[in-house]
Image (tube, rainbow, N blue to C red):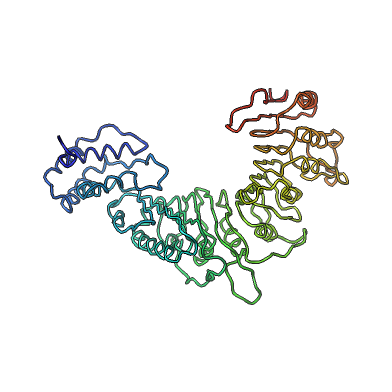
Amino acid sequence: MALLSDLSVELLCLIFEYAYYSSSRNKPGYHDLDTISDIASVRNFLGLGEQLRSMRDDTSSRTSSVVTVWPWMDDNVRSLALFPYNIRAVCPLWHNIVVCSPEYWTRIIFDVANDPTTLLDAFSWSTYFPIDVFVFSSASDAIDDQAAKARESGRVESIVARLQPHIERCIKIVFDIQFSSSLPSPLVVFTRNAALLTDLRLDCRIDDLGCDVADASNIDIVTPAPQFVFRDIKLISLTGLAYLQLQKLGHDWNAELGSLSKPSLYISHFQFQKERDGMANRNTITVMMDLISQIQDNLSNIHFQNMSLSYHPRIKSANVVRPYELERPMLHFNNVSRNFIAEFFSITHASVFTSFSHLSIPHLPGTIFYGSLKLEGIMNTPQSPLTHDDSLFNILPGWTGEDLAVCRCPSFNDELLDWLAEDVNGKFDTPYMMRLHIEDCAHFTPTAMRRFIAARNDTSNFKLQSRIHSFQANRLQSIYVNGTGPALGKEDIEWFDGNAEKMNLLVDWRVVDANGSLVPGSSYQSPLVR
């Protein structure tokens, strides 16, 4: 009975090459005859090792026209069971075969829960090919486990040391590890000619540095890469400390950052310190905003995640001058503290689009939002499943946009709808709102929604006025209700049938069950939609 160990080297090469193409998104036709000839010649190198590697290098130059790097099939790279890592782990013979095919090593993966030493040569195995580098941790250590921190930090350091000479070949550099203290500095990348780079992610799950981290201004000034290098970058994800380190690149280095690709910027895991007169401190929210202001015209989105302050901000007047205005990028706030939100919007105007998710919102005086607004999972977290949070009451008076989306917010209820329907001294809150999209909100009733629509779309509110100060409110143009939520009763349907067309209002109401299936008889569309 034949064993795997009885297979010839040339047959193994063909099997591994088939496995490579099977792991790729694109399936090429049969291979070029010259390539088959090169593979067949392997039978003369039973010793493999350097002889096989030299043979591969020689043939690569002759067959470069037929060697193609295909995108990988698996998007989830948090595994060393993927090709070719699964093959090289079988035995030394298989290892020696696969490391001689550089196109197999265009995706270099490390799990720093394990010793990476045996994989550090993967950078050289890929020779001249462009590469994606993924570094993750499958470990789940406690924040006070000092031995685990030291172990992860040492392993990351050894990987970065091997990575640095190859950064110019990198298309993606992704670190997704446990501790912020183990992450490399972004200066490792931004001081190099990484012209191929599209994704840079230096992420962690636990911020073990806190607010006691050394001031970012203590980093020595470094020489940045030429401006044009990062014009095609599409995604940048950094911790707050890492982002603040970029100030050491000077004022002009980022003028071309993302100018061709309009990247998304993620900033996460940081506790900003308070500005103090007469004290040098560059770990402040205003320094972050200075850096953002320099590149905002080139950004499509800015995401703030898991951020807080080490102090309580002072409540500022509604008429205070806000020095920063983010006019172009869409802003997203996810799981940030109330104090961070209060301080951010005491110095910043937002426009275009702003979203808040999985957080609580403090009172924000004055008008600070001009564009579309999305509220998702407000106070709807495992830690705080509150239905009477005041976040929506706090944020909506300061919003002057036309499009509002509310998703999975328990505090979107009848009380809020009745409050929004109130005419206070001839004015409504959210006066410019024209379109309302509600998804997976189960704590309001169709009756309250009808009262809200009736108040806002009363025709007496829309008499033509020649002076802007007499403006009362826009007419609601569309209401979309989707997902888990209240179903319309017979009386509700009759009301919408009788009033929606008269109000020139589009209503699309669809209720689904827990499995996402449309509940029979719960779908409604107003006459203008049908």
Locate residue 493: give its quadrant: top right
Inspect this view and state whether residue 352 appears.
no
Q: Residue 17: give x, y in percent of width and height.
A: 26, 39
In screen coordinates, is 158 left or right of 382? left
Q: Is residue 409 above or below residue 339?
A: above
Inspect this view and state whether residue 419 appears.
yes
**The C terminus appears in which quarter of the rendering?**
top right
Query: Which residue shows up at 27% across the image and 37% down it?
Result: 18
Locate residue 310: give its quadrant: bottom right
Pick the front one: 161 or 406: 406
Q: Is residue 313 above or below residue 71?
A: below
Q: Residue 58: give x, y in percent of width and height.
A: 19, 48
Pick the front one: 240 or 312: 312
Outermost residue toward the left? 44
Query: Which residue shows up at 79% across the image and 29% down it?
Result: 503
Pick the front one: 365 or 470: 365
Pick the front one: 410 or 234: 410
Query: Which residue shows up at 52% across the image and 50% down it?
Result: 263
Q: Residue 282: give x, y in percent of width and height.
A: 57, 69
